[in-house]
Amino acid sequence: MGGPEVIVTERLRGERIGPHHVDVLLPIFSDPRVGATMGGVADRASVESLAQIMDAHWEEHGFGYMMWFERSTGEPVARGGLARTVFDGKPELEVGWTTTPERWGEGFASELGQACVSIAFGPLGSADLVAFTLPHNGASRRVMEKLGFVYEKTAPYKVYGDHVLYRLMNT
């Protein structure tokens, strides 16, 4: 079973990400402030590839990352959602987010994160959910903790070096 292609929260509207979102993703992923929390700055070709990967995830799994817009202004404020991944050799369902630096601290990551938790534990029926980030990304770690995630371990993630893994159980 898949998740919805559109999610509406109090302040946000999330829609399934696809290649047509490259122009709104590029300012986020090419920003050095975001690059410092994501393992580097991306160029247009990298963002195009990322959008295609996220679109393919939707096609394969029926859920995935979304582009999030502020409902009152229509302004893009984040990329976030759910994805199948492997962390430290184990298949996981991950929730992740990346907000526009100009809007950091406004609670958008927590709001979209809570919506994604509800989808993971509702329609997707997941027993648990993980979130992870670089160890120095304190803001993202605080969002994880606010959502109820508990630190589990630090381990290498792909080519990006050590990441901290947090887990939330569906109770």
Image (spheres, rainbow, N blue to C red):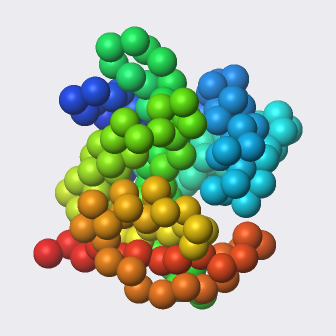
Percent from the top left, x then y, of residue 161? 72, 76
Percent from the top left, x then y, of residue 113? 34, 50
* Left or right, 64 with reference to 169: right
How many numbered marks are there?
Answer: 0
In terms of image quadrants, where is residue 28? Answer: top right
- Residue lying at the far top in this picture: please name it: 73
Against 33, residue 170 (above or below) is below
* Residue at the spot 55% in from the left edge and 85% down from the top edge: 154
93 and 151: which one is in front? 151
Against 28, residue 86 (above or below) is below
Against 117, residue 92 (above or below) is below
| Location of the N terminus (image quadrant) | bottom left
* Residue at the spot 38% in from the left edge and 23% down from the top edge: 70
59 and 156: which one is in front? 156
| Res 124 visible | no
In terms of image quadrants, where is residue 23? Answer: top right
Against 11, residue 164 (above or below) is below
73 and 125: which one is in front? 73
- Residue lying at the far left in this picture: please name it: 171
| Location of the C terminus (image quadrant) | bottom left
| Res 91 visible | yes
* Residue at the spot 46% in from the left edge and 58% down from the top edge: 140
* Left or right, 9 with reference to 88: left
Percent from the top left, x then y, of residue 34? 65, 46
Percent from the top left, x then y, of residue 165? 48, 77
